Each structure stands twice: as structure tokens, then as C-alpha cells.
Amino acid sequence: MPEETPQNVGSVAASPRSPLHTRMVEWAQHAWRPAGTLVAIALTLLLGWGVVNGRHGLSSWQRQRAQEKRLQQEIQDLQKENDHLRHHIQRLKSDPDAIEHEAREELHYARPGEVIYTLPAAPQSQAQPPSESK
């Protein structure tokens, strides 16, 4: 009769649960890699979506960049307009011919003895003749 060692005693006592326990351990050992891979893929996809569509993602960055370009262009246009108006004001302050030109064009002033003729405004849209169909 074989001697009962503590190893044999433990395995005999655990033998009714042993097949289920070993199957669970084997399943866990085989399933952790695919499950871990699925979790890693899901986290990667979630992170990628957040980078592209998130609050501070690429799409938001592109919208802000386009808005920045529009605003920079608007600033440049306003600066040019300001420079033009400053130059115009300077001319009006110092040049009598510019003052006269402004008075004649904008205010319709005339020198004594001059006659100003005002022509009617051109019609904005004329009716187009109907096209001939063949």
C-alpha cells in the first residue's frame, strides 16, 4: 500500500472539486490574453476618438485655427482701413485742395457762379428679353 503523503492527501480531498477548479484555472489562463487584447483595443479606440472628436481634439483645433486665420485677416483689413482714414484725415487737415474736393463730392457744394447738373441714377436691373427656344 502506498504511503499517504501530504500531497496525496490534499489531492484526494480536493478531487471532487479538482476538475472544475482546474477547468476554471485553464480557462482563465487561456482567456486572459484575448480579453486583455479586447480591453486594450477598446481603450485605444476610445482614446483615438477622444483625440479626434474630443473637447480639445483635432476637429476643434482645426475650427479654431480657421477662425484664427479669419480674425487675423479681419485685423489686417481694419488696420489698412485705419491707416487709410488717418491719411485722409491728415490730408483734410493740411491740404486745402482735399478739403475742396471733399466739399464738392460729398456735400455737393459749388463755387459762386457754377452750375451743378445731377444726372438720374442708372436703373439697377433691366428686364432681359425672353430667350428663344427652338
Image (cartoon, rainbow, N blue to C red):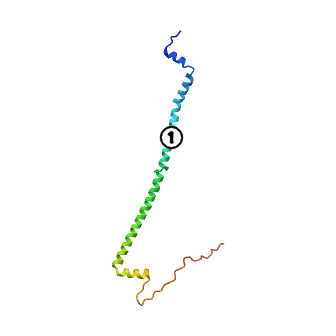
Farthest right residue in view: 134
Farthest left residue in view: 94
* Residue at 45 percent of width and 53 percent of height: 61
Residue 61 sits above or below residue 78 on the image: above
The amino acid marked with disc number 1 is Ile
> Where is residue 106 shown, x and y percent of the image?
43, 80
> Where is residue 133 shown, x and y percent of the image?
65, 72
Q: Quadrant of residue 80?
A: bottom left
**Within 10 angstroms of label 1, few (less than 14), some, or many (20 or more) residues?**
few
> Where is residue 92 shown, x and y percent of the image?
36, 78
Q: Secondary structure at mark 1?
A: helix
Q: In the displayed structure, does residue 62 sit left or right of residue 18?
A: left
Quadrant location, the C terminus: bottom right
* Residue at 38 percent of width and 72 percent of height: 85
Q: Which residue is mark 1?
A: 41
* Residue at 55 percent of width and 27 percent of height: 24
Q: In the displayed structure, does residue 94 sit left or right of residue 1?
A: left
Residue 64 sits above or below residue 15 on the image: below
> Where is residue 20 shown, x and y percent of the image?
57, 24
Residue 26 sits above or below residue 75 on the image: above
